[in-house]
Amino acid sequence: MTALRIGTRASLLATTQTGLVADLIRERLGREVEIVEITTEGDVSRAPLATMGGTGVFVNALREALLVDEVDVVVHSLKDLPTGPAAGIALAAVPPREDPRDVVVARDGLTLGELPAGSRVGTGSPRRVAQLEALGLGLEIAGIRGNVDTRIGKVASGDYDAVVLARAGLARLGRVDEATEVLDPLQVLPAPGQGALAVECRESDPDLVTALGALDDAHTRAAVTAERAVLATLEAGCSAPLGALAEVVEAEDGEELWIRAVALSTDGALSVRRSASGPVADAVALGIRLASAMLDDGAAELMSAPVRKQQA
Ligand SMILES: NCc1[nH]cc(CCC(=O)O)c1CC(=O)O
C-alpha cells in the first residue's frame, strides 16, 4: 500500500502534534506515512487573529489540500476548528486529550496572584483577556502573537511579565516545566476543544474514515462535542469571550458527561457561569441545554455588549 500523506501546518507545535498522530497511524493502522507541510494565511500574516476571520484561517488551507487530493489526512488543534459544517470533510478521529487547562509562564516563577498590579500579561485571546480581567488583579493585559517559543521568549526578554498559554501546547513541546502556574478552571475555563486534536480525511474515503476510527477516544470526543455545541449554540466565534470544559465522570449509575461554561463581557466585568450533566451519548443535547440556560441568563447580550471600560 502507498504511504498515507498527512498534511500539517509548518509550526513546531503543529508538526509535533502531527508526528504524534503519524506514530498512532503507523502503530494502529500499520500504514506508512509521509508528512506534507502546508503554509496557511495565519502563519504568514502578523495581523491579530481576531481580525483575520479567527483561527479558521489555519484550518481552511489544510482542508483545501485534502479536497484537492494533495494529502489524505490532516491534523488540527481541535480548538481551532470552526463549528460550522465542512463539505466533504470527515472528523475521523479525536485522539485522547492532553490536560486542557491554561497555564501562566511568568517572570521569576511567579503566579498571577503574586504579580504586582500593573504587571504586563500577554495574550491575544478575548476569552483569556476577559477571564484575566475578571480576576480583578489590576493586571495590564496586552495583545501578543507568535508561536509558543516567541511568546515565552517575550517573558525572558522582559517585554512582558507573564503570558498565558494552553498547557497542552507546552506539554507536547516538552516545555511544561516552564509554566509557573496551572490555572484552575474554577477561575479560567479553557477554550472549547482545547488540548484535543482533530484528525480529518475526505468523506469520499470511507475505508480511511473507518480505519482512522482506531485513533478515536470516545470520552474525549464526547467532551469536545458538548463543548463545541455550547459554542455553536451561543453563536460565539473563536474570538468570543467564552470558556467551556466537559469531562466524563463516574456517577451512581455509570458514567456521565459533566460540563461547565462561562460567557463574559469583553472587559470581564460581567459573566454568566453554568454547569450541567447528562448521558455521555447525548453530548450535543447537553451542550445545547447548557447554552440555552446561559442564553436565558443573558449570555448573548453580555458577549456582544459594547466595551465600557476604556480609561486606564
Ligand atoms: N490559539 C492557537 C492554539 N491552538 C492550539 C493551541 C495549543 C494546543 C491546544 O490547545 O490543543 C494554541 C496555542 C495556545 O492557545 O496557547
Image (tube, rainbow, N blue to C red):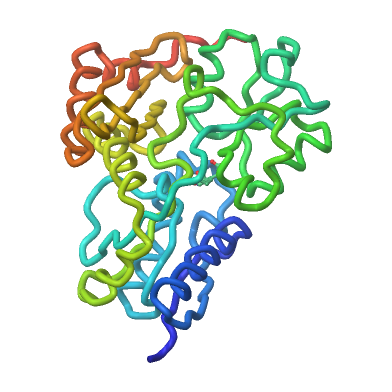
Left/right placement of residue 114 relative to residue 134 reads right
The quarter of the rendered structure image containing the N terminus is bottom left
Residue drawn at 71 percent across, 10 percent down: 117
Frontmost residue, 186 versus 35: 186
Frontmost residue, 48 versus 216: 216
Q: How many numbered marks appear?
A: 0
Question: In this picture, is 214 found above or below 82?
Answer: below
For this orientation, the residue located farthest to the bottom is 1
Residue drawn at 47 percent across, 67 percent down: 24
Which image quadrant is residue 71 in? bottom left
The quarter of the rendered structure image containing the C terminus is top right
Question: In this picture, is 81 found above or below 296?
Answer: below
Residue drawn at 73 percent across, 40 percent down: 177
The image shows residue 231 at horizontal and vertical percentages of 29, 34
The image shows residue 241 at horizontal and vertical percentages of 41, 26
Frontmost residue, 273 versus 310: 273
Left/right placement of residue 304 relative to residue 254 reads right
Frontmost residue, 159 versus 297: 297
The image shows residue 95 at horizontal and vertical percentages of 41, 55
Residue drawn at 35 percent across, 32 percent down: 246
Left/right placement of residue 259 relative to residue 61 reads left
Which image quadrant is residue 132 in? top right
